[in-house]
Amino acid sequence: MSGEQPTGTAAAPLPVARAAVPAPAPVAATPAGPDRSGPAPAGPRSDPASHRRGFLAKAFGVTALLSAAGSALGLLRDLLLARLFGANQGTDAFLVAWTVPETAAPLLIEDAMAFLMVPAFSLALVLREENPEAPDPVRQLVRSTLPWLCAALCALSLGAALGAPLLVELLAPGLPDPGLAVTCTRITALTILPFGLAGYLGSALRAHHDFTAPAGIYVVYNLGILAVLLTCNAIWGVRSAAVGVAVGSLLMAALLVGPFARRLRGPAALRGPAVPGGPGTGAGRARRPQTGGLVLIPLAILPVAVFTLTRQAQVFVERYLGSGLPPGTISHLNYAAKVSQLAMTAAILICTVTFPLVARALAAGDLTAARDRVEKDLGQAAAVVLAGTAFLMACAPSVVGLLFERGAFGPQDTAATAAVIRVYSFGLPAQALIGVMVRPYFSVRPVVRRAGDPSPDDGGRRLLDWYPAAAMVLGLAVTVIVGLLATPAHGALGLAAGNAAGITTTAALLLRGLLLRGIAVRVGRVLGGQARLLAAAVGAAAAGAVTAGLPADPLLSTLLGGATVALAFAALGTGFGATEVRGPVLAAVRALCPSPIADEGKLPHGR
């Protein structure tokens, strides 16, 4: 059966529609006619596009606020870890055990689970809108997938705990204290089940355009870690960090259970708010014929899982090669990665909020809307991450000194971590662009399909399913080669250089993959916009480095360098014609100085 199976126990596909409700969805799917006109109030009617922008702005604001709080707490967690334990063989042992949740999070929360289940729930929602009088397809999907997922997660958690000695030996054979790493690994193995549940429930809520609870999971996660670290570090030492990770993961899943249950409680509560003018509302697309069911495609999971694990394998390479370097090297790499990833947070938030819209557009067959959204996301994500990259390039020493240099974390640790950050930063734009590109790629063939659609399991399309994984394997090969060649002479900097080179290779290959997948991104336009943003970032980093080096105090250095980078990036981006920078800058100028001069700089189409 080509790896496909119906969502029910019978041989025929399950019916997928929901119980009858007096909902307005059929009206939204019906072309406007005289019977809907009625007496209209005077004045122009609101534009659906402006409603859609308002929804996206609100969703992004909520997600950004909670994610920023989670990131701040995560940074506080790392600061506390550095203050309590420094960078030594004990923290190296914990960070090897941290590989389990560090791998489980992208696989089960951020990437693979979202790539699979957001498109699946989005398709179920589209089918519900097309046939609102039959049993609910969302509930059918939950009943068919959630029990199997829980069983698989329990098996993985048990396997990771039992295989902890082997995992530690494979990941860090040169570790001075493998026993401590084994203990911490067995504790962190408990995170696999709650992580998977959090990813599944969060994907369902995002598909319903409910972003608040999913955005708060890292707030409660880091609060759990901090609580255990503060209360138990004197008793358990670095093991308290591992226990905190397990406690935090349970809080993540618990936060989402209530909102998810309310979505399933009744037909009225199940309906996710439609985005005005968006896919699935009837605007911009013809109404598709009603279908009889959803069909699971279990084998669609494999390329997504392999891609995510291969991407995470870059960390495995660093830990493996770093275990043979002086004690503290793995910790320096970890702290540098944590700081560097802060520059990507807002960029990833953009595609987190817009991913359900892309998935709905693809489920509705609207490739043009999906392409336009992806192009906007690529530009906006690049603008955000390049601004952050310029800041890190200019201010890395002062940022690390300000954040970490206290307690057991000394000046030598600061210098080593700052140097790694600067090398890592070369790969940050590629990291963000991969996050944008891979989501629509996997949405083209989700884990479920309409029962009435032709099977997509022809050989060519099945091979394309593996394209991101193959691109990631090639990027990983570059990481390994550069790391092996550069590490003997440059130590941790060689490992960071391998990471940046490998992830950049993968990003270039994935851009080509979008075209092969049928999402006709206009490469010339995309690359032109990226080049303008890159030029602005280079100039901003150079200017910021000059001013950041003037004061000796790390706080003043960070503030002065950061302000210089922000102003230079805004000015250069506007001058180079980067739409993602010029539009907000001119809007800010018009808001601050409402004058004819400011209005003359207004871009066409409100951009």
Image: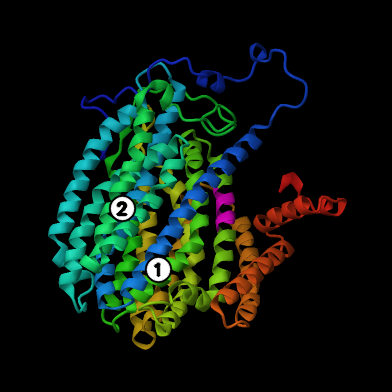
Residue 416 among those drawn in magenta: no
- Disc 2 crowd rating (10 Å Cα; few below 14, some 14-19, many 20+) is many
- Secondary structure mostly seen in magenta is helix
| Amino acid type assigned to the residue bearing label 1 in the image | Leu
- Residue 565 visible in the displayed image: yes
Between 79 and 41, the residue placed more toward the observer is 79
For label 2, the residue is 248
Tell me, what colour scheme is on the image? Answer: rainbow
Q: Does residue 185 lie above or below 23 as drawn?
A: below
Residue 444 appears at what percent x and percent y?
43, 42
Which residue is located at x 30 percent, y 38 percent? 297
Q: Which residue is found at the position 48% from the left and 25% from the top?
A: 288
Most foreground residue, 540 or 305: 540
**Residue located 20% across and 59% down the image:** 187
Instruction: Report the magenta residues as a range.
Output: 374-381
Residue 514 spot, x, y in % from top left: 48, 52
Does residue 157 appear left or right of residue 500 in this picture? left
Residue at the spot x=68%, y=67% of the render? 567
Mark 2 → mark 1, Cα distance in angstroms: 17 Å
Upstream in sequence: badge 2 or badge 1: 1
Q: Is residue 263 left or right of residue 27?
A: left
Tell me where residue 179 sits by quadrant.
bottom left
Q: Nearer the viewer, residue 32 or 4?
A: 32
- Specify whether 378 is left or right of 143: right
Residue 79 is labelled as 1
Does any portion of residue 446 appear in the rendered image? no
Residue 417, above or below 30 = below
Residue 278: horizontal and vertical position, in percent?
56, 34
Residue 206, quarter of picture: top left
